[in-house]
Amino acid sequence: MLKIDTEACIACGLCEETCTFGAIRVEGDHAVVGDNCTLCGACVEVCEVGALRLEREEGVQTADLDSWAGVWVYAEFRHGRIAPVALELLGAGRGLADKRGVALSAVLLGSGAEAADGRGLRGAAAELIAHGADRVYLVDDPALARFTDDVYGNILTDLIREHKPEIVLAGATAVGRSFIPRVATMMAAGLTADCTELDIRGEDGALLQTRPAFGGNIMATIVCPRTRPQMATVRPMVMKPLARDDQRRGEVVEVRPEAARLQSRVKVLDSVVAALDKVNLAEADIVVAGGRGLENAEGFALLHRLADSLGGAVAASRAAVDSGWIPYPHQVGQTGKTVAPKLYIACGISGAIQHLVGMQSAETIVAINRDPEAPIFNVATYGIVGDLFQVIPKLIEKIEQRNKG
Ligand SMILES: Cc1cc2nc3c(=O)[nH]c(=O)nc-3n(C[C@H](O)[C@H](O)[C@H](O)COP(=O)(O)OP(=O)(O)OC[C@H]3O[C@@H](n4cnc5c(N)ncnc54)[C@H](O)[C@@H]3O)c2cc1C
């Protein structure tokens, strides 16, 4: 914790100016620290009279691990809709909660006035229950209409402190990546980003969090045995949602936060959808992807013809993007997009792990590669060993014939 020597403090206000969390302020003749202090130590460094001291309570949460129970999913709600990744996480969370024999809860933050389907946030809560949640903690407040790290972080942290879930999952979206690390810091808990697999360890119920490591060359399984909650983010399209079941019953718990916790230091002036995000790979049922085997930008013209004949979207490996043959928004993989189409056709792509993590959830994978040993064939449903410049024109011809017929 942050200790203040009130005798030494000269109330100069340097700490208050430095704290980006607004967690320390001068009251009267000395500084006072609030609940939202993250123990980052920035104020200690600027204090010129040595009045501030950090005392880290090592393993502060180790004593009562058994008092933490339940699996939580942060259900991102943006532009009036639940983000699809929230439903995917409920699918994964349901399996974890059943293994642990605990409840699965969703945390839904937003402003009812924003809900696009006209059913408001309660409609969104019902949708979360239909997709596997036993309980939804619902915070409906105009202050939550626009996302800000500090307010969303405050609310989620307060809920975690009160209800003590053992596992908290969130989408590795721009929003999740922005404020979930803040929550983990405030809880002094571990956080594993961009997990591709989650499971429960049989002997002690710990969360096994698997993600690519060392540049994606190995898959590492990470465990946080000493702190709670165990926190993980997962990219969209990696996990599968459960089928919607409107017969499922669950509880909606409405939460009213303190007004002070809804005050943001951030003023959102405008929010703009970036033109680069308009390549809609994520929603395409058919994705045709090309790699270094396409040889140059003209190679992608052939790929576009194949995609057009199938009504699909064009994607690429990083090698093709780095070569400048196609822009970055088309990149699939660890540092690109994650897709889970019905059909993924990989042309001239070797199947490096960094590419596979972005597409291996596709229902059917067809690989075209002249190297029979290419790793892409390990994940392919159907493999065509051959020169893509011969195979693809033949495929286009067949598909166009079928389209005409
Ligand atoms: C931190 C990190 C993050 C990364 N992120 C990503 C990412 O997000 N996405 C990604 O894709 N990669 C990513 N990579 C790069 C990744 O490791 C590979 O280098 C990359 O995926 C290789 O692309 P490729 O398969 O197109 O090229 P190559 O590995 O060179 O494979 C080309 C394939 O084309 C085949 N081929 C060649 N000519 C023909 C032909 N005429 N007909 C048929 N087949 C042919 C070859 O047999 C070969 O298998 C990342 C790497 C790192 C270190």
Image (cartoon, rainbow, N blue to C red):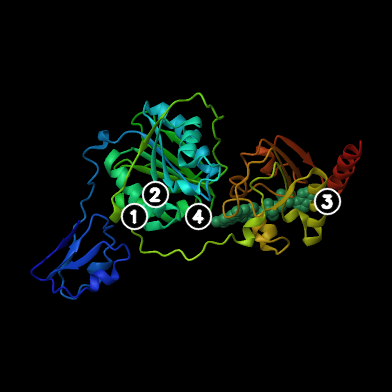
Q: Earlier in the sequence, mark 4 or mark 2?
A: 2
Residue in the picture at 59% in, 59% down:
273
Would you say the beta carbon of the disc 2 residue lies within 8 angstroms of ligand 1? no
Decide: few, some or many residues near mark 2? Use Cα within 10 Å; few <14, some 14-19, many ≥20. some
Provide the residue designation for mark 1: 262
Name the spot of residue 400 as percent of width and height, x first: 88, 42
Q: Where 273 sits versus 201, above or below?
A: below
Asked if residue 188 shows in the view, the reply is: no
The circle drawn on residue 305 is: 3
Q: Are marks 1 and 4 in contact (CB under 8 Å)?
A: no
Camera-nearest label, 3 or 2: 2
Q: Quadrant of the N terminus?
A: bottom left
Q: Callout 3: helix, strand or loop?
A: helix
Judging depth in this view, the residue of 347 and 75 nearest the camera is: 75
Q: Is residue 401 left or right of residue 133?
A: right
Contact, mark 2 vs mark 1 (Cβ under 8 Å): yes
Who is closer to the viewer here, 268 or 326? 268
Whichever of callouts 3 and 2 sits on the residue coming sooner in the sequence is 2
Mark closer to the chain start, 3 or 4: 4
Q: Is residue 177 left or right of residue 284?
A: left
Of pointers 1 and 3, the one earlier in the residue sequence: 1
